[in-house]
Image (spheres, rainbow, N blue to C red):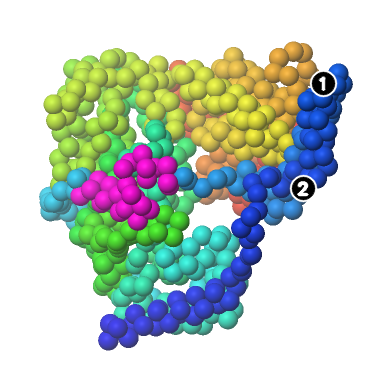
């Protein structure tokens, strides 16, 4: 019976593979083709020969020919690159990504491997050994005993067969990428054959759902080593990226649409990773509001950051399944999840050369659509059961905020939370990454903490989710780092975009410069001083100069150039970010409030009374955003969707 179930998925996969083979193209290559660049024309070759002849014959004007040749080379490169950009669907990004592949032969010889197959085995052994070295037997019973009462009234739910429309909607959401798993079926192929295959896909998915079996053919993962940092010739400096079957991930997407509403009701608000309408910015603002609030009340505050090593790869299947049962999952989804998690395998592939596969006995199957969902459910216990701290979690990164009226009591609470978290990691079978465990105090300097004979001293600043948080709650360190990154990006525009036109370099500026400012922009821009905003603007101006290929120094009306390209200033960016965040937080809140009492002018305009703006309370995001909300016109406040509000806010703060 099991063979019959998996055979249906096998036939569907083979059908797609057949059409994929028909769509494959081949190209004849000339074995004697030289390495001459495509932009190097016959005219350039003649000009070079003329220049060399004049130089060898001792003619005085050979330098003029040389300069003419160099100028012609630059022009040919520029024309070729700009034509490549115009002919590419992805524009500048496609041209920039056309880099050379990883030199596996160099790594092979440096690492002492005789052939590509041995190198693939070396990567496979490294990835396997890392997980096996971190894994330990979990004992989660004490955790679940405490969790059960918290979910005593949770209604049960389960997955149900999908419809043709469900599958069509999931296919429409796929990105038309060409990457594929071991079965060589890409998202682009699935989208191209949507109408021909949708009935077969729906039937296969429903067999999987009804019988609680995830097809074995979609459980294998192709692992590609991706460089992290350090020497490129060391295997240890690469991380694994798992590519599973896209058909299997399509089934996951259908399942995810069904379970997300139920899972969201169970997960607490202080878990932020991989959840709808939540991100790193929300996690950091939540933490900082807690810190400012406690400091305003006169408490000493400290924060302890913990990180789990390869947590997605070593979390126990038993923990995930028991957590799902506590959340009210029915037997069908539990059986399906067990089949989904167990029996998976990985193999490393280097340009067509594969290692031997190895089995996965733990983990939430990193690289699959449901992996973050399973991880969030499996690790939700500290967010729910936290007693001695305020917890905020984002995937495997967590921060714990403790506070007390005295320094002595605050240090005691720090030791309590460290003890509790170490016990939790051991009970869950996870490995605590001591190198990323950090401690910071606000209003005082905490005592050092000791974990496994390793002393961790307090820091003056720690980086959490990409933001540098200082003990004085200022942003000069983060902004200095940001300004350096912006100047580095400007230099990158000059180098990598030297052959592009102005509008193409503007795209690089938007991606490399503006992208860094908008990332967690609310956190540091909302309370940045005018001097700090000026520093960011100056760093941004270096990018504007790079767009126009202007000198790095010297007087230039940069604001006029910025306006010409409709690029926002840092003040405009700050206003847009705060206005949009204010709309997100208060639009539904204000609408849900009943109108009690007389209709004043402020209430008619949906204004909110200003909270305390002094000291630490004035730096709390909710309090700062009230002011931004009250400045919005009623037309924007009445917008029903985020897209409409964003469009109107952009018009309001137009360049």
- Which sits in the foreground, 198 or 181? 181
Is 518 on the left or on the right of 412, as rendered?
A: right
Task: State the extent of the magenta-drawn residues as a range.
Answer: 104-132
Between disc 2 and disc 1, whose residue precedes?
1
Crowd rating for badge 1 (residues with CA inside 10 Å; few <14, some 14–19, many 20+): few
Is 530 on the left or on the right of 167, as rendered?
A: right
Figure quadrant of the C terminus: top right
Is 35 on the left or on the right of 139, as rendered?
A: right
Residue 421 x/y as whole percent: 20, 37
Residue at 37%, 21% in the rendered image: 461
Residue at 56%, 39% in the rendered image: 581
Residue at 36%, 73% in the rendered image: 217
The residue carrying mark 2 is: 83
The residue carrying mark 1 is: 58
Q: Is residue 346 magenta?
A: no
Q: Which quadrant holds residue 320?
A: bottom left
Q: Is residue 348 visible?
A: no
Residue at 19%, 32% in the rendered image: 418
């Amino acid at each position: 019976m099991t063979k019959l179930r998996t055979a249906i998925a096998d036939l569907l996969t083979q059908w797609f593979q057949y059409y994929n083979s028909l769509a494959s193209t081949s190209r004849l290559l000339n074995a004697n083709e030289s390495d001459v660049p495509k932009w190097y024309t016959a005219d350039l070759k003649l000009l070079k020969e003329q220049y060399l002849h004049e130089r060898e014959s001792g003619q005085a004007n050979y330098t003029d020919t040389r300069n003419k040749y160099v100028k012609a080379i630059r022009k040919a490169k520029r024309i070729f690159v700009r034509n490549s950009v115009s002919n590419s669907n992805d524009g500048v990004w496609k041209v920039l990504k056309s880099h050379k592949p990883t030199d596996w032969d160099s790594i092979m010889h440096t690492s002492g491997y005789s052939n590509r197959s041995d190198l693939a085995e070396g990567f496979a052994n490294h990835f396997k050994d890392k997980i096996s070295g971190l894994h330990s037997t979990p004992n989660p019973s004490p955790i679940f005993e405490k969790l059960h009462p918290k979910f005593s009234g949770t209604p049960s739910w389960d997955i149900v067969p999908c419809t043709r429309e469900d599958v069509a909607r999931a296919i429409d959401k796929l990105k038309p990428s060409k990457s594929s798993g071991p079965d060589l079926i890409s998202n682009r192929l699935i989208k191209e054959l949507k109408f021909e295959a949708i009935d077969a896909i729906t039937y296969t998915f429903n067999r999987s759902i009804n019988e609680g079996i995830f097809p074995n053919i979609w459980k294998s993962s192709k692992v590609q080593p991706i460089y992290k940092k350090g020497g490129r010739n060391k295997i240890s400096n690469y991380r694994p990226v798992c590519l599973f079957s896209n058909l299997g991930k399509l089934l996951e997407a259908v399942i995810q649409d069904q379970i997300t509403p139920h899972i969201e009701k169970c997960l607490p608000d202080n878990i932020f990773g991989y959840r709808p309408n939540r991100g790193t910015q929300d996690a950091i603002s939540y933490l900082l509001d807690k810190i400012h609030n406690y400091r305003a009340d006169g408490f000493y505050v400290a924060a302890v950051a913990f990180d789990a090593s390869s947590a997605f790869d070593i979390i126990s299947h038993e923990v995930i399944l028991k957590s799902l049962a506590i959340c009210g999952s029915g037997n069908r989804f539990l059986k399906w999840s067990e089949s989904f998690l167990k029996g998976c395998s990985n193999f490393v592939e280097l340009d067509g050369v594969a290692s031997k596969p190895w089995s996965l006995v733990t983990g939430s199957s990193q690289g699959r659509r449901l992996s973050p969902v399973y991880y969030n459910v499996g690790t939700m216990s500290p967010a729910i059961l936290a007693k001695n701290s305020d917890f905020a979690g984002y995937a495997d990164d967590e921060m714990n905020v403790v506070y007390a009226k005295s320094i002595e009591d605050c240090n005691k609470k720090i030791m309590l939370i460290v003890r509790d978290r170490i016990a939790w990691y051991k009970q869950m079978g996870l490995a605590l990454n001591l190198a990323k465990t950090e401690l910071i105090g606000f209003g005082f300097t905490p005592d050092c903490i000791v974990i496994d004979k390793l002393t961790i001293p307090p820091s003056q600043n720690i980086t959490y989710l990409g933001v540098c948080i200082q003990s004085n709650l200022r942003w000069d360190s983060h902004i200095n780092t940001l300004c350096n990154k912006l100047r580095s990006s400007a230099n990158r525009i000059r180098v990598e975009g030297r052959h592009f036109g102005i509008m193409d370099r503007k795209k690089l500026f938007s991606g490399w410069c503006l992208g860094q400012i908008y990332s967690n922009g609310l956190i540091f821009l909302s309370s940045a001083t005018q001097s700090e905003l000026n520093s960011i603007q100056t760093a941004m101006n270096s990018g504007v100069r790079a767009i126009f290929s202007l000198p790095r120094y010297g007087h230039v009306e940069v604001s006029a150039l910025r306006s010409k390209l409709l690029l926002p200033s840092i003040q405009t960016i700050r206003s847009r970010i705060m206005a949009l965040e204010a709309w997100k937080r208060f639009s539904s809140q204000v609408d849900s409030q009943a109108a009690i009492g007389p209709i004043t002018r402020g209430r008619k305009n949906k204004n909110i009374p200003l909270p305390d703006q002094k000291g630490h309370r004035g730096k709390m995001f909710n309090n700062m955003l009230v002011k931004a909300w009250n400045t919005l016109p009623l037309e924007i406040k009445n917008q029903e969707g985020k897209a409409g509000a964003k469009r109107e806010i952009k018009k309001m703060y137009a360049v």
